[in-house]
Image (spheres, rainbow, N blue to C red):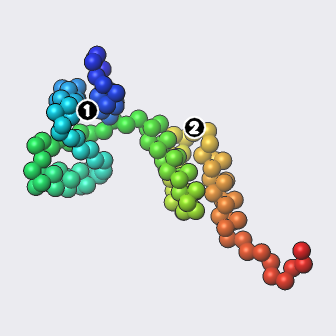
Amino acid sequence: MGGGLSALGAGLYSLGIPTNSIVEYETALKSDQFLVMAYGTRDEVAQAQRLLEAAGAAQVAAYQATIPRETLAQHAFMHGNSCLTAGQFAEAIAAFHQSRELNPKHPYVAARLAEVERRQQAAGATPPVNTPV
């Protein structure tokens, strides 16, 4: 990685941004300029580049991210937890399955899927009518 990178620089480096670009971006930020980052499909990235260029961006660059599968799996897992908390069960299930697909050894996915099922059943359960208590 090379010495002298800030925490931001180290983060950019971990995403696969070349060191010479990182130094340039850090210098620009210190000069009160800003850095816009986006993540998406190839088409979404192309659209973002066109929009930034049309808006007069000083520089536009695209990089192929090198995010480790474990990190992507963790993000999917966290998204699943957020969806579960919000009661978005189908989205939670999809996120947990994505997490398991990215990292089959993730220790808590099976438990979270069981929790989704339990909460789904509890949310759909209605108390019996005219049942003495």
Q: Is residue 54 visible?
A: yes
Q: Amino acid at mark 1?
A: Ile
Density class for disc 2 (Cα within 10 Å; few <14, some 14-19, many ≥20) is few
Number of marks in the image? 2
Q: Point out the residue furthest to the front here.
A: 32
Q: Amino acid at mark 2?
A: Lys
Provide the secondary structure element on which disc 2 rests. loop
Front position in the image: 113 or 28: 28
- Real-space CA distance between mark 2 and mark 1, rounded to the nearest whole angstrom: 29 Å
Q: Point out the residue furthest to the bottom here.
A: 130
Q: Residue at x 63, y 50 (%)?
A: 112
Name the mark on residue 17.
1
Front position in the image: 58 or 79: 58
Q: Is residue 102 visible?
A: no
Disc 2 to disc 1: CB gap under 8 Å: no
Front position in the image: 13 or 111: 13
Density class for disc 1 (Cα within 10 Å; few <14, some 14-19, many ≥20) is some
- x and y percent of residue 23 in the render? 20, 26
Is 112 displayed left or right of 100 in the figure? right
Is 80 displayed left or right of 21 in the figure? right
Q: Residue at x 31, y 31 (%)?
A: 8
Is 39 displayed left or right of 132 in the figure? left
Q: In which quadrant will I find the C terminus?
A: bottom right
Name the mark on residue 105.
2
Q: Residue at x 34, y 27 (%)?
A: 7
- x and y percent of residue 121 in the render? 69, 65
